[in-house]
Amino acid sequence: MSFLALWLGVGVLGGLASLARFLIARLVAESTRGDFPLGTLAVNLSGTLVLGVLLGAALRGDGYLLAGTATIGSYTTFSTWMFESEREGEARRRVAILVNLLAGLALGLAALWLGRKLGGG
Amino acid sequence: MRPAEDPPPRRRRHVGGHDLGAIFLGGFAGSLARSALARGFPVAAGHWPWPTFAVNIFGAALLGYVITSRQERDPPTLTGRSFVGIGLCGALTTFSTMIAELLAMLEASRWGLAAAYATASVAGGLAAVLLASRLARRGLAGG
């Protein structure tokens, strides 16, 4: 794959993955009640599961750069997870902030592990 | 009394084609920057994942600044935050790669490194949003 095609792919896949993140997080947020940021959690956990599948299938090199780093890396997000947690802290919802952070980390590790099994790793 | 032409609640805002275009372009740029860093600075097993850590903390600060200054100055519009907030910050930062790095540390029994990386990412990310939001509010109050 040429240099230009590879990095154009990294950009285009990252852009499409960002659209998917926005639309799926919005759909989940609209179809659930309450203030807890389930949309971001759903996106992050589903993306981490797929990254696990890619790792389990031992994808490497340019394939991993395109599918893993660019696509799944852009689909999942750290900044919104932190932003929503910080705003829960400002609103003094201490339980919500702890649940959001700890559930994110614990379920994220579980999703990656499960994905890797599914991918054959 | 709310006038009948009040804008609809935030969750039901209309999403236009220009919003989707802005999210795509922001995501394009964020993906390029993070992927280039990952390729340019590979991290050996058992070492601190500086590329992921740096983009995550920087992206959290940028998102805090942009959303705070947009939301608390103007009536929030989706268009204003699509490019930088949802597209760029969303794609520049990553949750899945951080989790993969954490699991690799745990499986190598590097408990201290894993605990330090998880704690520094979460505490650093929260502090970055908090400080950037304060900075944006100070800018609003002063201007």
Image (tube, coloured by chain):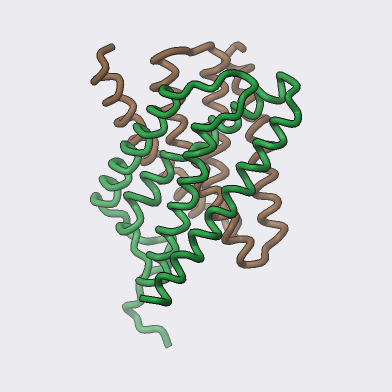
Chain colours: A brown, B green
B2 horizontally vs B131: left or right: left
- In the foreground, B57 or A60: B57
Which part of the image, by quadrant, shows the N terminus of chain A? top left
Q: Is residue A100 above or below residue A33?
A: above
Q: Residue furthest bottom?
A: B1
Q: Quadrant of the C terminus of chain A?
A: top right
Asked whether, in this view, residue A102 is left or right of residue B69, the answer is right
- The image quadrant that residue B28 belongs to is top left
Q: Quadrant of residue B121?
A: top right
Kindly identify the residue that appears in the image at 51 percent across and 40 percent down.
A43
Q: Residue at x 55, y 59 (%)?
A: B130
- In this rendering, is residue A17 above or below B138? above
| x and y, in percent, of residue B124 in the image | 60, 48
Residue A86 at x, y = what percent?
59, 57
| Between B123 and A15, the one nearer to me in the picture | B123
Vertical comparison of A77 with B81: above or below: above
Q: Quadrant of residue B77?
A: bottom left
Q: Percent x, y for residue A89?
A: 64, 61
Q: Give the residue displayed 39% in from the left and 48% down from the top.
A: B86
Q: Is residue A107 left or right of residue B131?
A: right
Residue toward you, A14 or B10 = A14
Position above or below: B92 against A3: below
Residue shown at 47% from the left, 46% from the top? B58
